[in-house]
Amino acid sequence: MIRSLTTVAPLLIGVAILLTGQGLQGTLLPVRATLEGFSTFSIGLMGGAYFFGFTLGCLRGSDLIGRVGHIRVFAAMTAAASAVPLIHGLWQETWLWWTLRFVTGYCFAVLYVVIESWLNEQSTNETRGAVFSVYTLITLTVLAGGQQMLLLYDPKMMALFAIASALVSIAALPVVLSVVPSPSLAETRIKLDLRRLWKISPAGALGCLAAGLANGAFWSLAPVFVSGYSLDVSLAAWFMTAAVLGGAAGQWPLGLWSDRVDRRWVIAFAALAGAVSGVVIWWFFEGVSTLQLMLLSAAWGAVAFPMYAVSVAHANDYANSDEYVTISSGLLLMYGVGAIAGPFIAPLAMKMLGPGGLYLFAATVHLLLLGYIVFRISRRAPAPEEEHLPFADSLASTQTASHYYEDEM
């Protein structure tokens, strides 16, 4: 285990630095947009643009890598992603920020493909689950750390944009200078087959779609929600951090529980808990203390964020071994579609119901998913326990790179 992590240490260090910058941007931009007077719908469009770029990057990034190689693509994407925060800081135009968020989403998706394919190649079947577990833990931890960097300077100043840019640039150093051999592309390109995905696991597909709708809206608009509670910028950083840490805390308990029961019950529990916590936040957020608001944010994140991974694991339980890559790519697309649509729909709820409408929207999504999951449980027997793909292994299959490097699975 330690030897496996030592081998990929430069890649994990690069990821940690890269996503610290990403975490800072993810909170800084909605906060600055709110301070600049952007409408809630415009901020939602920024989120939708980011996830549209991210989904396109996941689907098309491997073609770019195939043309010029991993190292050059990583260097190019970090250069582009590093320039974007500086442009954000110089010009505050809604149409420009939409475009820049699309570019950021595309760049980060391709960067994930490069990093994760590298991790896949350096891992064996025995160590892949552990390696990706550490990778996921690092991802959630540094995102939270990046959000806390919002407290360093006034978000109206250029300093935070410069820090985000510097972090993305520095992230290239350990990866580009690493002596770890870069992976070779699989010759076979994976084709999406949504009809097959729906036949194998409609519950898994809708679980990923629901996770995209709720989580995409959260990432795009949660800082706007916080501004309805308090104009204190530091509160936005703590609120986002609480949700991310809650997601990190909930990932493994729910995942390991799903290894022991029909995973649909775990998805149903997460959907029910997400709906309840969402309604509580919507109804009480103006009357609770700051500490209570943080705890509610953590509780929501603990069930909302792991839903995607458990849904992927459930779908893989019914897939043939040679279908894992195709199924995972289809599930990623379902998540992406939801994450694009969520930031467009949630502002309508916020306009009608106030800032708390964000969480009522998420609660509605979770309730609809709960109803469908209960229906599916009544119609289809659970997968035999011996066919369960262990959650640690299925966690690796939720990563973007595994959708394109079939020879590594």
Image (spheres, helix red, strand yellow):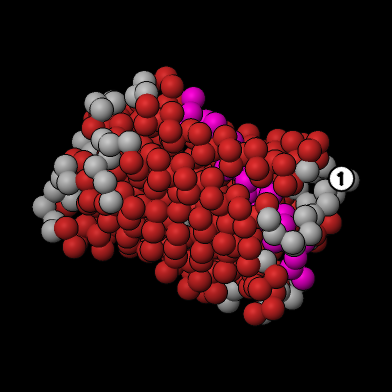
Could you tell me which quadrant the C terminus lies in? bottom right
* Residue 102 on the magenta segment: yes
50 sits to left or right of 148: right
Q: Check disc 1 and report its element: helix, strand or loop.
A: loop
Residue 67 position in % (x across, y down):
81, 36
The image shows residue 130, relative to residue 103, as above or below, that is below
Q: Quadrant of residue 309?
A: bottom right
Disc 1: which residue:
188
Q: Is residue 22 or residue 181 the one in the foreground?
A: 181
Q: Which percent across, then down, holds residue 361?
A: 34, 41
Is 307 contained in the magenta span?
Answer: no
Taking the spot 11% from the left edge, 52% from the top edge, the residue there is 287
- Residue 102: % across, % down: 52, 30
Tell me: residue 33, above or below residue 276.
above
Question: Magenta span: helix, strand or loop, mainly?
Answer: helix
Please name the residue shown 75% across and 65% down the image.
122
Classify residue 124 as left or right of residue 239.
right
Farthest-out residue, right: 187
> Where does the image place residue 190, in percent across and percent down from the top left?
79, 43
Q: Amino acid at mark 1?
A: Thr
> Which of 384 and 254 lies nearest the eye of the viewer?
254
One can see residue 238 in this view: yes
Q: Residue at x 40, y 40 (%)?
A: 162
Looking at the rendering, the stretch of residues picked out in magenta corresponds to 99-124
- 296 vs 205, left or right, is left
- Residue 344 appears in the rendering: no
**For residue 385, what is the image quadrant?**
bottom right
